[in-house]
Structures are given as C-alpha cells and as structure tokens.
Image (cartoon, rainbow, N blue to C red):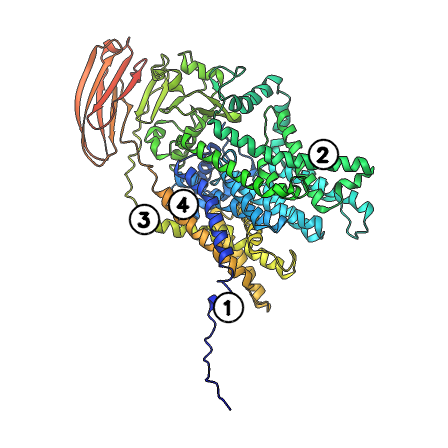
Amino acid sequence: MRVLPSVRIQPRSWFHHHDLRRYGRTMLFDIMVLIACVIPGIILSQQQLHEPWNAFRVARAQLSTDQAHIADYTTNAGAYRPEHLGSDLIHTALIQATDWPLDSLVVVPIGALLLALGYYGVVLFLTSSRRWAAGIALFTSWYYPGIYNQFSTQTYVWVYCLLLGFLIVFYQWLTHPKRVYEILLTAIFLATFLHYHTTPLWMIGLIVIGVGGSKLAQRTTASPYRYSWLLPVSWIAWDLAVDTVLHHGWQHLQTISFTTIRQSFVSKVLGPLLQRTPAGLDPFMVAPVNPPIATGSTLICLLLLTVPVGWWMIGQITFMRKTRQIQALVATPQAIFVWAIGGIALAHTTMYLLYGALSLRVIPVLFPCIVPLVWREQPWARWRGPMLVLLVASAMVGFFHFAPTIQPDMTAQQTGRASGLIATESTVLSDANLYGSLALQRATNHTMINLAWIDASNYRAVAEGHPLPQAIDYIAIAKTTKPLITTQWQYFISWILTNPLIEQHPGTNQIYASSRLSLLQPIDRALPTVVPQVMALEAPSSWIGHAFRLFGTMLALFVIPGLAIVWLAQRKQMFGPNLDIRVILACTIAFSIVHLTGISYLVQLTGIGIEWISGLTLLVPIVGLVLVRLRGQSFTIAPRWWRYGISVLVVIIAWIGFATNNVMAQTTSLPPLETFTTQARAGAITIHLANNTTAPMQATVVIETHDGTTLMTSTQQLLPSTVTPLTWEIPVTADDHAIVIRVMTDQQPPLSLWFAHIPRGN
C-alpha cells in the first residue's frame, strides 16, 4: 500500500477568509467611482468658492460658541428662526470638533463626500445595479449648477442627505408597509424641518401622493395594511403651525408682480441660453453667463432627465385612458414612487413661479433617482447604457468648461483689518460674499455687523455719485471683476467695471485700502478711533493633525450614531436580510444627521449648553450599544459588510487627506500691505501703514489735494508684521478740498485713500 506524503494545510488568513481577492474588482470599482465623485468638491474648495448664506450661518455659529444657545440676533442677511436652527447647530458642532479656521469650514468639501455616498446607496437600493448607482453618483457630483450649493457645509448638504434617506424608507414603506416605517419617516421629516423650510414640503408632497396612490391601488388588491391620511395631515398641520417662513412667504406673495417673474425668467433662462444679458432687467443687473459648452451640457442633462420621465408619464396616462381604470396609474409601488417625485417637481416649480422666481431644483436633485426606473420601460431601453454615459459625460464636460471661469471669493483673513474699523451692529452695503467674509472676521471677535442688500437704487447711487441712503454706514468694495451677488440670487456688474473711480464718491471718505478691498463711509460719519487689533501671521502647521480631527469628527457626527441605529434596525430585519453596505451607509448618514439634529435641539432648548453637542452625539449611541450588549445581544458584522466597507474606508481616508491638505494649503494670509485712518484728536488724523509681510519695506506717504497741491510728504520704514502710525495735523487750507493720501512702496502696488471731506473730529 502506497502511503501518500502528508500535506501541511496552511491556515487561511483573514484576507482569504473574507474572499477579498474574489471581490477585489468590485472594491476597486467602488473606490475609483467614489474618488471621482469627490474631485469636483475638492476643486471648488481649492478655488475658495463661498456660498454666502453658508458663511452667514458659520458666523452665527461662531458667535454662539461662548453661549449656551444659538445667538438670536437678526440681520438683513438672515433672520433668527428658532424652528430652523439645525444648520447653525451643526456648524457649532463642527467648529468645536474640528477646531478649524472658519474660512476652512466654509469650503471643506464634506457635502461632496456625503452626497456621493448617499446617491450611490439610494440608486443601488432602487435598481440593484452598480452601473446605474455609479453613473448617477458621478452625474450628481459633477453637475456644476447643483454642486455650488452642496459641496461643502451648506444647509442643502444636510437636508439632501436626509432626503435621500427619506427616499429609501419611503420606497420600503410603499413596497413592504409597516408602522415602524411611518415613525422613521416622521423622524426624518421633523429633522429636515428643523434645518430648512422647502425640503419638508417636498416630503409632505411625497407622502400625500404615496398615501393617495396606495389607497387607490388597494381598491384592486387585498392588502391588509391600511394607509392612513393621518400621517400627511399631521405633517401639514405641524408645518402650518410652526413654520414662520410660510407666513412671511404668503405676505411676500401678495407683493409679487408679473415683472418680477419675467425678470427671474429672463436672468435665469434667457440670459444663459443667449450668452448675454437680455433686455428687461433693472439697470446694472446682469444674467449669469457661463461658457456656451457648459450651458449646452446643462441643457442636455436636463433633457436626459425630464424627457424619459415625461414620456413615461404620458405613456401611463395613455394606458389609463385605454383601460378606463385610474388604478392603472398606480399599479405598482414603483409607479407610485415615480408619480410622487414627478408631482412634487411640478408643485415646486409652480410654487416658486408664484413667489416670483423660477426654480427647477427638483429635477437635478430627485429625477436621477427615478430615471433608472422609467428608462427600463422606454422604447429606447436598449440604449440606456449609452444614454447613461452621455448623461455623465455631459455633466463632466460642463464642469470642466465652467471651472476655469471661477473667480475665488475673498476669505475672512484676506479682508485684513477692514472689519475691525466697522462699528458694531452698523450696516454695510456690500456684495453678499464679501459681507460673509467680513462677518466671519467679526465673529472671531464675537461682534456682528449688518448687511444692506444691493439693489438698483443704491447701486446707482454708489456708481454714479448720488446721495446715499441714510441707513448705510459703510460701503465695502472688492477689487475684483466678479459679479455682485444680492438677494434672490440676482447679480449686478462689479462696481469697478461700472466706474473705475468709484472710490472717489463725492459723498464718502475712504478709510481703508488694500490690494483686495476698499472701505468707504459717508462724510457725515466720524472716523474710527480704535486701531484694529494686530493679527499675527500664523506659521503653516502640519495638515496631519487637522486630518485626524476631521476624521474623528466625521466618524463621531456622521457615521457612528447612524450606524448604531441601522444596526439596531437590522436586528429586527427592518430593511431585509441582504441590505448592501452602500445602502446601509446612505441610511447611516441620514440617521446620523437625524440624531445630531435631535441632540442639538435638546441642548439648545434645555440650556445644557451647545458645547456638549459633539460629546453627547457620540456618547448616546455608545451608551445605547453598551446597554444592548449587557442584555446579552452580540455584535456581529456580516462578511459582505467587511468586503465593501474596506473600499468605503479607503475612499474616506483619501478624501480626508486631499481635502485637508487642499484647504490648509490655501492662501488665507492678510493682504501684504494695508493702509487705514483713525481720528487721532480734534484737527488730526492718524494714517496707519500695516506691513503684513516677513520683510521690512520703505513706504512714501504723499498727502495732496485733488487738484495736485501737495500738503505733506513722509517716508516711513515699515517693520515686518507691524502697523506703523503717522499722524497728520490737518491744515485749514484742506477744509475746502478733496484729499488724496497715496502710499507707495517698491515691493507692493501703490494704495490710496480718497476723502471727499476730511473730518476734523470734535
């Protein structure tokens, strides 16, 4: 008998045990897709593209850090609405958890990551197709008209993440109705309401159509589940009773004229299509004009989203007319889902038209979720692959043609000492983006300023030298050709393009100048008497520490709480036994924001102190899991979660590295040279020369009348990182002349201050 040699069996490694080699291709696909999704957000972050309303909220959050609650001040830039403080509270948590500069928090691309993961999970849940999930995630990440409002820490990031989680639960409720889903839907609705006023109305529309369609479909089925109108009615009652925005909107609606609607259509539709500012706008207003290829690609994307959905709806209505049965419209939960999203798209557009604006926001936000469902039933279904490629390619082409035209916004530190010269609670006429940077700079000193929105009247007064409204205390002028943003997303021509000598307004004195910014005040206002505090230049710090803090913040606020909730739900098989990790992650993000919002409002209303938001957000789910474990429940993670979870973890680590290094490497230092004036005493002013570089420079100061008569010349040696004062006794001969103060150096461009009437003080 032949004896075979013994074979030593090698123990299987963890790598082989989980079949990671077998699933390596899928994991690599996920990594490549998700990293491609976050690239546009990183690019916009690098370009320092601010969304002004986001800066307003970050400033309010910073002002609240030394209080037990959110600061309840109201300015023209934003009212204090206690029912919509969710974003302010999240910003407060981010400020405390990351300890990042405010400039960085305004542009860190958190939304680019969260929404990419959310869309990937939602579409995978609806279609079970990784190809469609990847394509839609890429489209929503590269579609440039949308990502401007949702790539960073804007309110839309939180409400859209909640909305995507809502869609998963809503579809599950339509297909496998349970009362527990209604509880989850209500929790997501309330959390969304605490952030914003529009998206909860979408959710109300979805639930109304969902209940109505399901009850209609039950006439031909024997489903034991009873859909109740109590759910949508209670939501509507809550919204009407609590939301103050609706009451304000109704009052505003009564003042809307056809001219307002026409101007909105002209500026947002005709202007981009015609590639010029068409007639019909107010003087000095402009329509946002993007490169022709970018505009064309946007039109192609909208057509690829709306035509299939519209074709499907027409086909359903035609079939209903043939069968003479209205139930044919809602024969399946999938059909109800599509009708619900189509219905709120129509309702949203109509509502905004009545409000005086044109908004197609629902189409790029929600239609990508239903296009895969309706394309399957189209005559051109076999072309759905090429059409998906065309959709993604159009979005990418549009972004690459749009990105080179982006002009960076001014950061808070780049405004220099200008904000310190502005009196507390005074009103500044300014572009919304510039005001946001000034407000951020003031917020670090825990003081606030107000905003006067630019309109046709006060723009003309500044540009053409007319008398200014009495309510305006200062005018901040950015030295850039970027259009000025004002309320209702309207745009005006840059002031320096309208009038290069705009700083020489006959009714103002220019009290501050740098290479980036000028600050003017009316001639009847007194000069500042306090020198703004000197801000030392910070040495560049390693980005690794900031990266670790961001990683911990993302886990503590947006992963661990929601993951605990999803794990507990899956113990009851709430979403089925084979839920994909990418779907779980979309639900995790949504439930984490629900949890974070709930904890934030708890500490806001009880007075515990908003400094406890981050700690309690992480502590509560951990304590809950410990209690579950003490009751004998075991913690197990399915192998499939390990397999695809690794790819997600790789993406998050790569995103944190790129985002942190990108944000921290931005140029946010002070302007190299600043000059400003304060009132030294009666009959004398002090000219301050701030050298913010690390090298000394020599400056020549020339004071002369507007007609060229020299009143004083002085040479000053400016030490590095130092403010040098120069006092000037105002001669009697200067009272009847406009005065120009010129500052010239060899290293920096010359600066000048214009005084229409030199103030002598008391």
Question: Which image quarter: residue 720?
Answer: top left
> Viewer-nearest of labels 2 and 3?
2
Mark 4 vs mark 2, CA separation in Å: 45 Å
Mark 3 vs mark 1, CA separation in Å: 39 Å
- Label 4–label 2 contact, CB within 8 A: no
Q: Which amino acid does label 2 sit on?
A: Ile
Dot 4: what SS?
helix
* Residue under the image location 79 percent in, 41 percent down: 327
Q: Residue 539: x, y in percent?
A: 28, 43
Q: What residue type is labelled 3?
A: Ser
* Residue that numbered label 2 is attached to: 314
Q: Relative to 312, say whether 629 is above or below.
A: below
> Viewer-nearest of labels 3 and 1?
1
> Viewer-nearest of labels 3 and 4?
4
Mark 2 vs mark 3, CA separation in Å: 58 Å
Q: Is residue 530 visible?
A: yes
Pointer 3 or 1: first along the chain: 1
Q: Is residue 240 visible?
A: no
Residue 102 shown left or right of residue 648 in the figure: left
* Label disc, if present, on residue 17 of the rendered structure: 1
Q: Residue 487: x, y in percent?
A: 51, 25
* Label disc, if present, on residue 542 of the rendered structure: 3
Please state which of residues 485 and 760 is positioned toward the viewer in this rendering: 485
- Residue that extends furthest to the front in the rendered view of this protein: 1
Please state which of residues 182 and 523 is positioned toward the viewer in this rendering: 182
Dot 2: what SS?
helix
> Viewer-nearest of labels 4 and 1?
1
* Residue that numbered label 4 is attached to: 659
Question: Total of numbered circles in the picture?
Answer: 4
